[in-house]
Amino acid sequence: MEICLIAAEGARYGQQKTRLAEPLFPPLGLMTVAALTPDRHNVTIIDESVEAADTTIEPDIVGLTAMTAAAPRAYELADAYRARGVPVVMGGMHASAVPEEALQHVDAVVIGEAEGQWQKLLADFEAGSMKPIYRNETLPPASSIPPARRDLVDTRRYVAKHTLQATRGCPFACSFCAVSTFFGSTLRTRPVEDVLDEAAALDGEPITLVDDNIMGRPDYARELFARWADVGKSFWSQASTTMLKTPELITQAAEAGCKALFVGFESISAAQLEKIGKRFNLIEKYEELVARLHDAGIAVVGSFMFGLDGDEEDVFERTAEFAERAEIDVGQFSILTPLPGTRLYRELDQAGRIFDRDWSHYNGAHVTFEPIGMTADKLEAGFQWVYERFYSWRSIVRRVGRRISPLIWTVNAIYNRRVKRWLSEMRCQPAG
Ligand code: SF4
């Protein structure tokens, strides 16, 4: 069969045509699904963050994936292919959260992880007996993750070309996050040998370990970092603030080649962190954590969210002030977004506070629910103000001026330019 796998792309920030960044990661999920596909089939991958899907082609079957913000585009594609008689199936976080909605546009949904179910779906499809829902009764072991089919994607078109997954899941359950709903709250680990083999086969560095919490299981992280030296390539990943409990792991990560970690600080208010289920984030330890990472030579990509219950209009200035004082290298700011499938969505939905269900607005840059500490307009304006301030030259000098890191300077300079362009485009257009 000819199988066409498509990652639909919605707006990341701002309006539909506005992009804050060039495509960051190649579609590792689809490259993994391609690797699960029996060899007798011919697979192509289209990632709409680099090229639009061609709806005039007629493969035997189309497999779609989409994050929530791209769901409307995925449905548009599905409708177009089905109108031409091409069967369409869908997987990924959004379809898994709202399979009944997805089934209004596609023939079948794979709920949760694809390992095992994708092969079953294809076999049923060939036999003419495809069912509407495919779902693993138990989470597949991480050892069943195959090396991704990188030959199907031109990875040179992405900022972070070399991606890899070592673990799945997260032991925490933050209310806004779909990771533990989708991947489970037990962190499953791939055999270190498999990860090292795949890393060694990549033709460059740095490698992005796309894991949601690379130090979520310290024993595994210890072994991975200890043996990563054999790979001899730098890497970056994500980790929770709890890594401060195992400072030796930070040192070990740095020695192994870790150059940056994405850390979800989310808020600088303990009450707000408690409400979103992130009490393990200790605000009084934030600056110590950043300093330790910097001492080890690891840059900090800090994530912060606005619009949490309890946030008032001063949250923007206080957060920007903190991020500058702590010398956060790169900042990612977003408006709290109730993604379907999360506890946050259920809570806000039950309280009748969700006023916007246009999924294309669920990209972290729009207010989709009634905030309680300020108006929706103030929340959106404050979020934009923080970006503008954080990527102003004054802030960049204050945050990274003392450290000579050409890469971090370059990233900030790129963001300075992009944020200016993005905000000017947003301000020229009426809200969508
Ligand atoms: S620690 Fe990070 S990955 Fe884990 S549930 Fe919280 S936000 Fe999600």
Image (cartoon, helix red, strand yellow):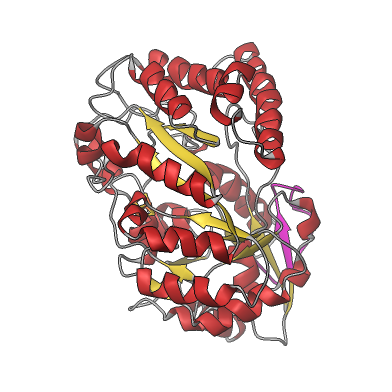
Majority SS type along the magenta span? loop
Q: Is residue 432 magenta?
A: no
| Residue 338 spot, x, y in % from top left | 35, 39
| Residue 189 spot, x, y in % from top left | 43, 76
In front of the other: 146 or 346 = 146
Q: Is residue 55 magenta?
A: yes
Query: Which quarter shows the N terminus?
Result: bottom right
The region drawn magenta spans 44-62
Q: Is residue 355 above or below residue 264?
A: above
Q: Is residue 343 above or below residue 188?
A: above
Q: Is residue 33 above or below residue 197?
A: above
Identify the residue shown where x is 51% and y is 75%: 226
In front of the other: 144 or 286 = 286
Query: Which quarter shows the C terminus?
Result: top right
| Residue 253 spot, x, y in % from top left | 50, 62
- Looking at the image, can residue 427 be seen? yes
301 horizontally vs 266: left or right? right
